[in-house]
Image (cartoon, grey):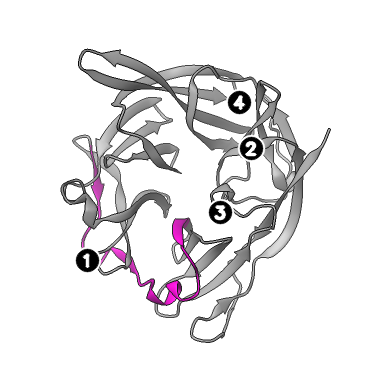
Amino acid sequence: MGSQEIPFSDMGADQESTPSDDMPLMAPPRPISTARLPDNMKILASCNHGILCCVRRSGKNYRYYVCKPTTQQLQPLSNPKLRYETVSVAVMVLGSDPFRYKIVRISRQGVKEPMKEYYTYRCEIFDSKTWRWREVERIKVRYSELIIDSVTANNVVYWLTNEDNVIAFREANELLYKFSLPEEVVEKSDLYKCKRLVEYKGRLGLTFLTEDGKMALWPTRGGQTKGMMEWIREEKEVIVMDTENLEKHVQYHSLAGFYNAGIAFLKGFREVVFYRFGDDDSLSRVELDHKLRDARDVFQFRSDLEPVRLGRVS
């Protein structure tokens, strides 16, 4: 059986910046290991607890796996209902002793109704405690509404759609629901470019480009009021990153998330970048391997080097 290498790096939080031209460079991330996974293995989702959800194709057959790259652990799983098209997958860790995780899968089924066409999104979860998949919720959306982005924060998975709505799955009560982005964003969507959902300080956040080209972040207060997410938009609490200097050094960059409250993680052309924003901005670049030229195939996650039990929770 062949294998493929998955390199990963450590971005040390205590690394210092060193001057270089007009944009200081943070010390480069430390390469710490290379995971070997079977051929035809595709990463579907990552999380900040060191594990990945993957799928492997063998001929016409597919098999789901969970793995921890830093310890070379690989665990086959049972499959969900693969006759429905996979739209998005997320993975979350619920406990460390015993180690327990859940995988959330959204799949799509076309349904026709009089004069309108809808998709039915089906939400399935895999629980390492029960060791099986089960469908928990369904939600209908119009054919024109597509999921374009996703993030997990505080055991809630959020999916952003191209119609400025958010579909969310809350693990605590296994509820799938939908809400809109702030009213001003929906009414003037063209003024809010490159919208993305991010996890910031354990909460959901919305990032976008302002009219003058700066990158802004609206965090949430961590709860909902009358079914609506409460976004923080007060000037003193909104985070704005001036990307003018960054654009001189990173081609075609797009925000992918945050390493911590002061460092953004961006994907560029043939590289990914850790960008420390603020008064003393600096960056650290990771050039993609020659076999991996598409930054969309890069997944951000955190991990330690301790083995965990990926099998069924006993």
User: What residue do we see at 37% from left, 50% from top?
Assistant: 196
Count residues near mark 2 (Cα–Cα under 10 Å), then give few for <14, some for 14-19, many for 20+: some
Identify the residue position indicated by label 1 in the image.
235
Write down the quadrant of residue 126 in the picture: top right
- Residue at 21% x, 12% y is 114
Could you tell me how far apart the alpha carbons at marks 2 and 4 are, in whole angstroms? 20 Å
Q: Could you tell whether 36 is left or right of 121 in the image? A: right
- Point out the tag, 1 or 2, that comes first from the N-terminus: 2
Tell me the amino acid under the disc marked 1. Answer: Glu
Tell which tag, 2 or 4, sits nearer the viewer: 2
Q: Are marks 3 and 4 in contact (CB under 8 Å)?
A: no
Q: Secondary structure at mark 2?
A: strand
Question: Where's the N terminus, which quadrant?
Answer: top right
Q: Nearer the viewer, residue 180 or 136?
A: 180
Nearer-N-terminus badge (2/3): 2
Give the residue type at disc 2. Answer: Lys
- Note whether 62 is above or below 246 in the view shown: above
Residue highlighted by disc 2? 42
Which residue lies under the disc numbered 3?
Answer: 295
Q: What residue range appears in magenta?
A: 228-257
The mark closer to the camera, 3 or 4, is 3
User: In 3D space, how far apart are the residues under numbered discs 2 and 3 (Cα atoms)?
Assistant: 14 Å
